[in-house]
Amino acid sequence: MPTLAKTGNEAMAEAMRQINPDVVAAYPITPATEVVMIFSQFVADGLVDTEYVAAESEHSAMSACVGAASAGCRVMTGTSSQGLQLMSEILPIVSALRQPIVLCEVNRALSGPINIHCDHSDTMAVRDFGWIQIFSENAQEAYDSVLQAVLIAEDEKVRLPAMVTTDGFIISHCMEKIETMEDDAAKKYIGEHKVKNSILNLEKPITLGSLDLQDYYFEHKMPVVEAMKQAKDVIVKVGKEFGQKFGREYGLLEEYKLADAEFAVVALGSTCGTTKAVVDELRNNGLKAGLLKVRVFRPFPGEEIAQALSKVKAAVILDRSDTYCNQGGQLYTEIRSAMYEAAKKPLLANYIYGLGGREISLEGIRQIYKQLQECQSSGQVIHFGVRE
Amino acid sequence: MKKNMGWKELWHGDSVPAGTAKEFQTGDWRSERPVFCAENCIHCYFCWIYCPDSAITLDENKKVSGIDYRYCKGCGICDVECPTKKDKRAITMEAERK
């Protein structure tokens, strides 16, 4: 396996090159620009067979993706923040049409105020659109998950679009050592695109996007509900097989020193790496600290999280975005909801942190574990690291 | 298509069989109707190609033969596009109720 120094964006573009999609339609946006910029260079250099559509906006980009997927193509794109929001009118159409489009999404704060740095507001804002959402802790995971996302999205039981996210600048622009597959191995792993529907198939002419009112709209949403249920097992299966083939296994969650932990942090994305370092340090000092990394946010692994947290005394849920619902961030509200049926409930607190790229340091995580040990009651929502 | 299907019976991915517009007769939307005059028609097919509802009928010799009022919504595009002269119109619009 080649070992390379790659930024998160380069790692995602490299995965795209090896996937060699039929069509990529995109509009560049910071910090995801390089994903499609590097890929367009692959197209120009003839390294891929892809038809590259340089769209005039993200709305057009995702619309072109829908058109290409409707024709039976394997389709990918990349975006971030405002770009994802501009796509958002089209995103639920993709899931309703059951098109397995794979999107490389780089997490960035939403305007306003305008900001180009990392938080999870953009991805969380589209969480209810029927897309699979996979978070990455580092560039390696981003590369691996983009490849896996094709298999997950195109699985017969799933056939849903998937977005794989990295954290803006923290992962997207930082260079790390990653292991990639040989091109042949990647090609074999990805396999041929199985076409389910094609508007160009004259043997079976179909209509897509027809008017669907009180009589059928509801029925047409149900397959998405069912596919999202099925997606859980498929993600686990694909992650396990990936581990068998390439040595790095993936699941819905990753438990880090959680088995005997008394105090746990639950987080998404790059912050998990920071937290692991603090967990090691605290363990050396005799504190039973642990981490629960949530890799997959959609479908939401509620039961699995409730099970994983059943033995801890107290847990902090870290959200890098707010819902403004006064009950905490997206990850917290969903975990709290998932814990309702749990026989054993730890104390839960919500820390909303890192908005607009505000740094979360080792010291910050240390403080969170310290405050967690003093936690007496559930339900606190704290905006951490903000000046008053 | 069968009526009131359950979601498990539906075609994959929000797709439906092509050509179902045939089962949906939109002629009753009409407030004005195009009236065809065969002797003034020059068979240029402008109306036939412009009609958004494929409601211009052709005879066995592929000549324009009239309007299919089951589907014609009375949009008037055929009248606008018809190149025949003012006193020899092949298509004229008339109110459904006078």
Image (cartoon, coloured by chain):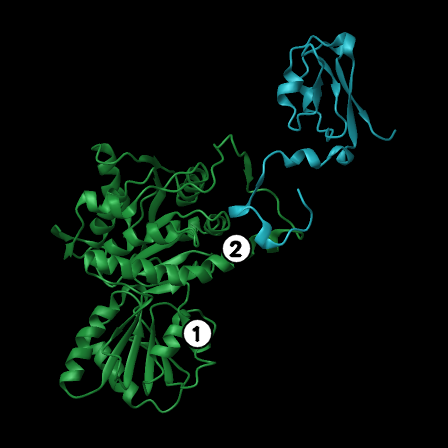
Residues at circles 1 and 2 in contact by the CB criterion of under 8 Å: no
Question: Is A81 placed above or below A58 here?
Answer: below
Kindly identify the residue that appears in the image at 38 percent across and 83 percent down.
A348
The residue positioned farthest toward the right in the image shown: B98
Q: Chain of mark 1?
A: A
Kindly identify the residue that appears in the image at 34 percent across and 63 percent down.
A236
The image shows residue A165 at horizontal and vertical percentages of 31, 57
The image shows residue A273 at horizontal and vertical percentages of 21, 69
Q: From the viewer's perspective, is B49 left or right of A332?
A: right
Q: Secondary structure at mark 1?
A: helix
| Residue A11 visible within the image | yes
Q: Secondary structure at mark 2?
A: helix
Return the disc, 1 or 2, that comes first in the chain's sequence.
Answer: 2
Q: Residues within 10 Å of mark 1 (few under 14, many from 20)?
A: some
Tag on residue B80? none
| Residue A34 visible within the image | no
Q: Residues within 10 Å of mark 2 (few under 14, many from 20)?
A: many
Q: Between residues B16 and A79, which one lies in front from this camera angle? A: B16
Which chain is depicted green?
A
For disc 1, the marked residue is A333
Kindly identify the residue that appears in the image at 33 percent across and 89 percent down.
A375
Q: Between residues A53 and A99, which one lies in front from this camera angle? A: A99
For disc 2, the marked residue is A223
Which chain is depicted cyan?
B
Q: Between residues A376 and A22, which one lies in front from this camera angle? A: A22
The image shows residue A341 at horizontal and vertical percentages of 47, 81
What is the quadrant of residue A74 in the picture?
Answer: top left
In this rendering, do the residues under marks 1 and 2 share a single chain? yes
For badge 2, the amino acid type reads Pro
Question: Is A273 placed above or below A19 here?
Answer: below
Q: From the viewer's perspective, is B45 left or right of A148?
A: right
